[in-house]
Image (cartoon, helix red, strand yellow):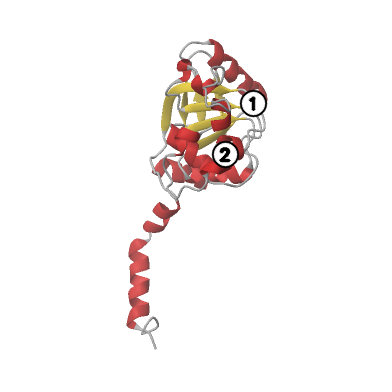
Amino acid sequence: MEPFKTLTALVAPLDRTNVDTDQIIPKQFLKRIERTGYGDFLFFDWRQTPEGEPVKEFVLNDPRFENAKILAAGKNFGCGSSREHAAWALSDFGFRCVIAPTFADIFFSNAGKNGILLVKLSEEQVAELLQKAETVPGYTLTVSLEDQTVTDGQGFSASFEVDPFRRYCLLEGLDDIGLTLRHADELDKFEKQHDGAGWLQPK
């Protein structure tokens, strides 16, 4: 997992509340066995019409927000089912950070485990970011996990709280597997002791 320390990037404004995981990645795409390739289907039903034509008004179809790595959205982002695929889709599309007033709990956990920093700011602060992202050409933010701040160099500055353990994992680029591998030597030693004692020998 790529470490997250400081990110300066273009902001895409998704001015919607209660964005659920079925909209983030619709259920018909959950049959894939890979963890990659989901970016093509992010917000699939909002990005195109039933006939397959791009919805020009949707933010991710707007050339102004191409290559945005920060998504600003309304409250209760990531509600609905617990599918981890939602985090995979956002990450695969290129988003490293989502800023919203509130997030669904399970999505919050899934995002952190997949290298996405979720930043909670007040509704007033998020409304300001949404407005600026929509009206200021090339609007960018700097999100520092080290300092726990969000700034735009134009007068906006906010701090955010983050769980210390999640902060550590993101700073170090550690997912669950990475955390386990940090104890590889101890695990090998433990297994050898068990092998030597004959505990794992077949009868």
Q: Residue at x 49, y 27 (%)?
A: 70
Q: Would you name the residue on which mark 2 appears?
A: 26
Label number found at residue 166? none
Q: Position of residue 123 (x, y in %)?
A: 66, 25
Residue nearer the viewer, 116 or 121: 116
Visible residue check, residue 145: no
Q: Secondary structure at mark 2?
A: loop
The amino acid type of the residue labelled 1 equals Arg
Q: Position of residue 25 (x, y in %)?
A: 55, 38
Q: Earlier in the sequence, mark 1 or mark 2?
A: 1
Q: Quadrant of residue 129?
A: top right
Q: Position of residue 154 (x, y in %)?
A: 50, 13
Q: Position of residue 90 (x, y in %)?
A: 49, 35
Instruction: Indicate whether 77 appears above or below 61.
Output: below
Pointers 1 and 2 in contact (CB under 8 A)?
no
**How many numbered callouts?**
2
Q: Using residue 3 as the reference point, say whether residue 164 is left or right of it.
A: right
Q: CA distance from mark 1 to mark 2?
A: 17 Å
Visible residue check, residue 4: yes
Question: Where the C terminus falls, by quadrant?
Answer: bottom left
Residue nearer the viewer, 62 or 75: 62
How many residues crowd mark 2 within 10 Å: few (<14), some (14–19), many (20+)? some
Q: Quadrant of residue 63?
A: top left
Q: Using residue 202 as the reference point, say whether residue 167 is left or right of it.
A: right
Q: Secondary structure at mark 1?
A: loop
How many residues crowd mark 1 within 10 Å: few (<14), some (14–19), many (20+)? few
Pair 1/2: label in front: 2
Question: Where the N terminus falls, by quadrant?
Answer: top left
The amino acid type of the residue labelled 2 equals Pro
Q: Would you name the residue on which mark 1 appears?
A: 16
Q: Residue at x 42, y 28 (%)?
A: 7
Residue nearer the viewer, 80 or 117: 80
